Image (tube, grey):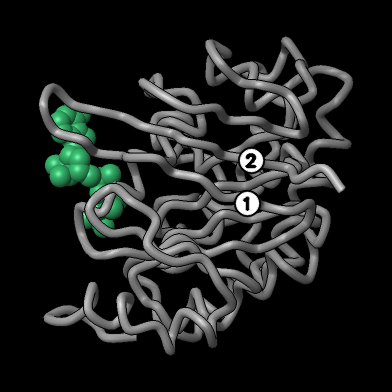
């Protein structure tokens, strides 16, 4: 089976500093893969390279079998690769449902999305309401974003890219600032209601990653030091060494 994402020999330098060296791993269709590593390991840099915000200096990135070299971020999104929306895309005074409906219509290419009219409005609203209900936030659909709690806001942030029904969703620390229960609810929602979406998840809470991902990629100093199941990674001596002094897995 063709993996949804295949990285091979990916490298990225900032001047003399090698931020990524020889990165290679695959994500299967519908697979949830965790990406962990100490601060500065290169996780966010790798996200930026995969999503097209930074050009790699070496290696290849294939998405659904297609080489992404030179493809701009917007075209990667159109092909089914989504990441958390920039905060600039979000309107604090609009309700949770209105914000998500906007993302749905953006994806559908409804040119009237900024004016509250247009044919797709009712359908987009229904989709937004469904996404919120699946996430356990149905009762907050009509609340302005600015009045949601931090945890509720993070869930809405994750729902925006899901409006695109992506084949791969990249989430960089979506659970930052969430309680353990809120984090579990967010990840459960993603896996239960969007099983067709493969996931690459970065989280500093290693228990969250181990609990929700079938496989885990461990990075240290810009390199992949281990790829395995949570049990394999937890038992690995190099991983334990990499985490000495921070949260030992
Ligand atoms: N634009 C840049 N220019 C120079 N160095 C950079 C740049 N972006 C990142 N770096 C460096 O690359 C290394 C990897 O950073 P990155 O943000 O990818 O790590 P990370 O694994 O996401 O860390 P964290 O867990 O703290 O988010 C760091 O040493 C960082 O200082
Ligand atoms: Mg980071």
With 114 as the anchor, is 21 left or right in this view?
left
Q: Position of residue 3 (x, y in %)?
A: 75, 45
Q: Is residue 150 visible?
A: no
Label 2, label 1: how far apart the Cα atoms are: 25 Å
Element at badge 2?
A: strand
**Placement of the C terminus among the 4 image quadrants:** bottom left
Q: Quadrant of residue 81?
A: top right
- Establish whether ligand 2 lies closer than 8 Å to the Cβ of label 1: no
With 16 as the anchor, is 218 left or right in this view?
right
Q: Position of residue 93 (x, y in %)?
A: 45, 40
N-terminal of the pair, mark 2 or mark 1, is: 2
Element at badge 1?
A: helix
Q: Which of the two marks, 2 or 1, is nearer to us in this view? A: 2
Q: Residue beneath label 2, please?
A: 6
With 18 as the anchor, is 180 left or right in this view?
right
Q: Quadrant of residue 66?
A: top right
Task: Pick the residue in front: 12 or 109.
Answer: 12
Residue found at x 61% / y 38%: 82
Q: Can you tell which mark lies on residue 159?
A: 1
Residue found at x 77% / y 30%: 65
């Amino acid at each position: 089976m063709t993996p949804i994402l295949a990285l091979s020999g990916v490298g990225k330098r900032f001047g003399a500093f090698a931020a990524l060296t020889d990165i290679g791993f695959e994500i299967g269709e519908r697979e949830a893969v965790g990406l962990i590593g100490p601060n500065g390991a290169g996780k966010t840099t790798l996200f930026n390279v995969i999503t097209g915000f930074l050009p790699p200096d070496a290696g290849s990135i294939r998405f659904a079998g297609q080489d992404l070299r030179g493809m701009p971020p917007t075209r990667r999104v159109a092909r089914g690769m989504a990441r958390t929306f920039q905060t600039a895309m979000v309107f604090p005074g609009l309700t949770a449902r209105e914000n998500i409906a906007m993302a749905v219509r953006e994806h559908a290419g409804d040119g009237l999305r900024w004016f509250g009219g247009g044919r797709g409005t009712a359908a987009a609203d229904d989709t937004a309401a469904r996404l919120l209900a699946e996430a356990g936030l149905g009762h907050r659909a009509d609340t302005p974003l600015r009045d949601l709690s931090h945890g509720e806001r993070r869930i809405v942030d994750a729902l925006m890219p899901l409006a695109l029904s992506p084949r791969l969703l990249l989430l960089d620390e979506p659970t930052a600032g969430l309680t353990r229960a809120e984090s579990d609810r967010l990840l459960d929602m993603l896996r239960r209601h969007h099983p067709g979406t493969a996931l690459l998840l970065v989280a500093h809470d290693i228990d969250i990653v181990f609990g929700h991902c079938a496989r885990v990629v461990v990075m240290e100093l810009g390199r992949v030091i281990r790829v395995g199941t949570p049990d394999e990674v937890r038992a690995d001596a190099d991983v334990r060494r990499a985490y000495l002094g921070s949260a030992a897995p």
